[in-house]
Amino acid sequence: MSSDLVKKAIRGNKKAFEKLILLEKNKLYRMAYLYVKNENDALDIVQETIYKAYLGIKNVKETGYFSTWLTRILINTAIDFIRKNQNLIQFEDLERIPIQDQYLLEESMDLLDAVTNLEERYKTVILLRYYNDFSLKEIANMLDCPEGTVKSNLHRAINHLKSVLKRECI
Amino acid sequence: MSNSFSKLKSEIDKIEIPEDRLQQTIKLGIQKGRIESRNPSKHFIYFSAAAVVAIGLFFGSAVISPTMGKIAAKVPLLGHLFDTRPIGAIIADELLQKGYQISGAGGGTGEINVRIAGTREYFDSIQEDVTTIVQEILDRKGYETYQFELVHINETPIDMPEEWKEAQAESLKVKEALREDFLLFDVYAGYNNNTKHFVVEIPKTETRAKEIEFAANEALQSMVTSKYTLEVRERVFTPIEFVSKLSEILTLEKKLQYKTATFYAFPVQEGKSNHFPDSYEGYEEVAITVYLSIPKSQWNTMESKKIRNEVEEMVREFYHSKEIAPFLSLPLSDIVIDSYENIEEK
């Protein structure tokens, strides 16, 4: 990513900001989609993220952190979205899947499904580490928590995925 | 494991992108941001004389602080750091000094307009140079986030009116007169609609505002024969302004001595290690934490250890100096000097 472009965007150049967003748009959408699992909500999250980024871009002090910063906004927005909409889940969605069916469902899951179904905090670390390729330190900074917490969440997430994907060799 | 996770990446990348809807979403997000960021701005055009530069405070602090004094001795014009005239006045001065035909410079929250007088051809010929100059001033003075617009106005350029020069000289005299008895941040003058407008900036801790106003009026009445207005204004450095001044000092100092280190200074929210709040909703700075970064490549050298200690000392002296402290309302909670791998080296 061009640091000149980021600098321009920080200085208020709208076209530079738009170009940066276009470079990141697919990643933003896919991340959002993995949190909410449907197109409409994912687009809402992307829109809110861009809006927040537009207002906050002037506060980015180091051009090298743009991508980290933007991803952080997306994650916070997605998690906020999920929390706000938790009360709106339809009753039928909450019905329990019979144990046997649940087992079959898990067996047929692929890795992507398994990641999508992870609890938010585990999903977040897996995506940041293996989809965005951020270092543990960067993730810790982004999530505002100690590096040790990131490591242990990552470890738990991997163990959980292992247990879910019994037939996969993770 | 790594194979499975590399597979994860390719699986995620297979998630279909609704191209048209995503484009529309991006447009709407930006549009919403634009609407939100357009605050009504007060347009007051300040003019001031190029020849007169407000100095003094820095040299005042240089007397009491050996570290700051060392810097001041090396940079005789460092006083511009404490030039608190409105940014429009600073820009107008510099452009006039360089001989550009302008009819004004000013703006409001987050915006700066510079009005270029003369023909369209003239505007086209100088547009690029003026943009560079103004952008450089905005960066230097910590206004890099301001939106800047160059406007062509087909009107008579400013010819440094006598009243304007007078107002500057008068503001300096008021400053000198008041400084004997009061701690001031600055006194400066604007000129608009044939009226001189004087602003006296005092610290938050000052309880004698009425007395200062009376003394300033007394000094002005003995000098100013034309119409004028006077405003005594409380001046508080926000953490961002404080850190912006620090950045200027460190940048200048780097040029002088710390050739190998690159510092960035910014305030952070109390209790948070992250530098970039993603939203200012509920964001409240309760203390100033100065965060300085040195590139990883320079982190482990002996030289950088020395630099770190010196810079930390400088920040503390700057914060506690008797000239700066009364203008700060938040405590200095910490100075964090750290290194970053991916920091951009300048």
Image (spheres, rainbow, N blue to C red):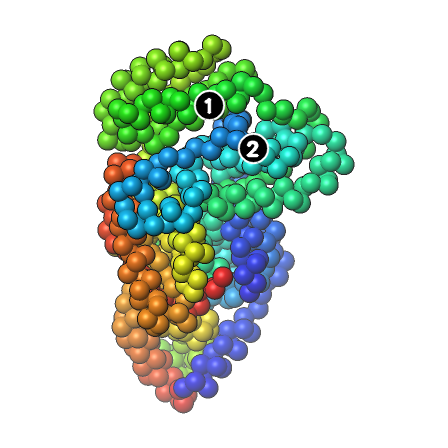
Secondary structure under tag 1 reads: helix
Q: How crowded is the residue under tag 1: few (<14 C-alpha within 10 Å), some, or many (20+)?
A: some
Image point (24%, 51%), residue name: B333
When the figure is inspected, residue B143 is found, relative to residue B207, above or below; the finding is below
Residue with the mark numbered 2: B92
In the picture, measured across the screen, residue B143 lies left or right of residue B183, that is right
Residue A2 x %, y %: 57, 63
Front-lying residue, B247 or B310: B310
Please state which of the two labelled residues, at mark 1 or mark 2, is closer to the viewer.
1
Q: How crowded is the residue under tag 2: few (<14 C-alpha within 10 Å), some, or many (20+)?
A: many
In the picture, measured across the screen, residue B335 lies left or right of residue A105, that is left
Image point (32%, 23%), residue name: B178
Image point (37%, 35%), residue name: B56
Please determine if labels 1 and 2 lie on a single subunit: yes
Residue B283 x %, y %: 33, 46
Residue A46 x %, y %: 50, 56
Residue with the mark numbered 1: B169
Query: Can residue B142 be seen from the camera position used here?
Result: yes
When the figure is inspected, residue B315 is found, relative to residue A72, above or below; the finding is above
When the figure is inspected, residue B286 is found, relative to residue A44, above or below; the finding is above
In the picture, measured across the screen, residue B310 lies left or right of residue A36, that is left
Q: Chain of mark 1?
A: B
Sequence-wise, which precedes: disc 1 or disc 2?
2
